[in-house]
Image (cartoon, rainbow, N blue to C red):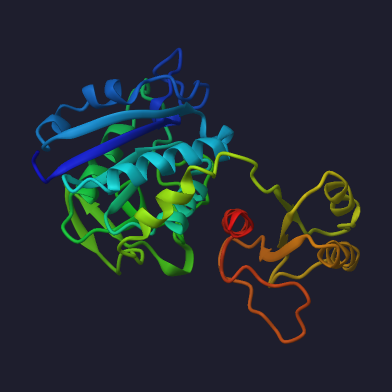
Amino acid sequence: MHPQNIVILGTGGTIAGRAASASDNIGYTAAQVGVEELLAAIPALAQAGTVLTEQVAQVDSKDMTFAVWAKLAARVSHYLAQPDIQGIVITHGTDTLEETAFFLQALLAPAKPVVLTCAMRPATALVPDGPQNLLDAVAVARHAGAHGVVAVCAGVIHGAADVQKVHTYKLDPFSSGDAGPIGYVEEGQLRLLRSWPQAEAGRAQAAAKSIAGLAGAVPRVEIIMNHAGAGGAIVQALQARGVQGLVVAGTGNGSLHHELQAALLKAQADGVKVIRASRCAAGRVLPTPADTIPDSEGLSPVKARVSLILQLLA
């Protein structure tokens, strides 16, 4: 086979959504169009070399589950191991894209590009954004030297560790915060600003052995938020339900209401793993010697949750 093959894995999302009217950009049903049908609507992709497709899942990404992640990771790992595959593109909803990207990077740290792409408008829109995003994602997957898990949307390339959805509606809803984007896709060409996510050769093969067990009993890790008047009742309720890990989205530099902090410290003493992140969209929690709850090491609350699940699985 030609050494330049690209695999496109479909998981659903708005990019595969349908609405009753071409003028309706929000009243659609996500995850309706198959990945092969998506590609058929983009003739330019047919001229871009061999593209293989597989429908891994068909979900609205608000409903993403760990079981789908495990299946997706297994398929990504399978294709990464094929010498004739240059890169992988994953179509995904925008809502939890940052979590899936971080999960795949943390688990696989691939030495080939794994590119998540998406859309903010359904496939039936008068001017859908999905086709261009998919073309751009394939351009990134074909770029010599590209590696690691990235997200591509509205011509911007974001690293898995940094990408966050920061807008509810606009076509460019993602930000990489303080880190800034990896680069841009301009008419099929890449303009890079910084390095690709760190890749580790052979990591995928090692991870493949553990992926099979991921779909079993997954540790329960929940996110709670600090706010004015935050109490400890929610922590106690989650403990009663057998929670194994808690990520708290603190205010500012991870600060916590004293009642919530007391409940978290008790949970920590009882064996629950507790991590302190920030609800701020930018910046990171800076630790101090007086800290009683460990910080998230720069991760957002949702990514800290993914990291903690993987830690507890290990």
The residue drawn where x is 81% and y is 65% is 268
Residue in view at x 28 percent, y 36 percent: 8
Dividing the picture into quadrants, the one containing residue 117 is: top left
The percent position of residue 23, horizontal first and vertical second, equals 42, 20
Q: Is residue 141 left or right of residue 77?
A: left
- The residue depicted at 56 percent of the width and 39 percent of the height is 215
Residue at image position (45%, 31%) is 13
User: As rendered, which of 48 and 274 lies closer to the eye?
Assistant: 274
In the orientation shown, which residue stands out farthest toward the bottom? Answer: 289
**131, 67: nearer the viewer:** 67
For residue 146, above or below residue 82: below
> Is residue 32 rendered to the left or right of residue 64?
left
Specify whether residue 116 is in view.
no
Quadrant of the image occupied by residue 122 = top left
Residue 160 x %, y %: 43, 57
In the rendered image, the vertical position of residue 123 relative to residue 293, given as above or below? above
Report x, y in % for residue 277.
66, 65
Q: Is residue 106 visible?
A: yes
Q: Residue furthest top?
A: 20
